[in-house]
Amino acid sequence: MLPTLARHALSRGRTPAEAYALLARRTKQPLPAARAVCLALSIPLAETTRRLNDCYDALLADPRPGTEADTGELLEALGVFDVPKTPTPTELAVIDLFLIAIDALGGIRAGHQHGLSRWFTTGNLTAAYLSLTAARPLPTGDPTRYWAALVTAGELLLTTPTPDPRVKPALTHCRAQATAHP
């Protein structure tokens, strides 16, 4: 019943956070409301359960009336409602190059790591690429390896059926950095 209501809310243009808030307000049961939104988004039950277990104590165990919208926004920001995309072989290769770059970075902030993880899950590799091209390797990192991995990743992103126009200037930047760090 709740997944049907969640699907209806989503089909009417509500965001997952808004659909959650609507169901949680109506039922006074945050966990079933969050589960219903995940299932309405076709997130597999096992993955839904894992995600909700990760945030249950902090967000869903002790709900306060009137905080449903805030909780929905937090669930969305944490990636609970992210719909996984199955990557193509090219996208898998790009992700592998991103992992090489992350390793060569010499350290990464937790928030940046979280964002990258969400982009990998949802298939938003352009956003991941742009965030990495804006970063700089730490003194403990390996700039040569970092920029080389991002050059190759950018070249692969340009081979996708509809490459994002922002990739080309970012790739130019990476090539210049790779030249400066031979």
Image (spheres, grey):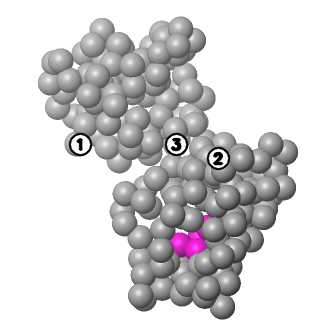
Circle 2 sits in a helix, a strand or a loop, which is it?
Answer: loop
Query: What residue is shown with label 1?
Result: 57
Q: Is residue 49 above or below residue 166?
A: above
- What mark, if any, has residue 181 been given in the picture? none
Mark 3 = which residue? 47
Question: Residue 100 lies in magenta, yes or no?
Answer: yes
Residue 11 visible in image: yes
Crowd band around label 1 with a 10 angstrom C-alpha radius: few (<14), some (14–19), many (20+): few
Q: Which residues are magenta?
A: 98-102
Measured in 3D between alpha carbons, the distance from the residue under mark 3 to the one under mark 2, in whole angstroms, is 17 Å
Q: Residue at x 33, y 19 (%)?
A: 21
The answer to which of marks 3 and 1 sits earlier in the sequence is: 3
State the separation of the CA atoms marked 2 and 1.
29 Å
Residue depth check, mark 2 versus mark 1: number of the one nearer the observer: 2
Query: Mark 1: which amino acid?
Result: Asp
Judge depth for marks 3 and 2 and give the one in front: 2
Q: Quadrant of the C terminus?
A: bottom right
> Where is residue 26 drawn, in percent x and y?
30, 9
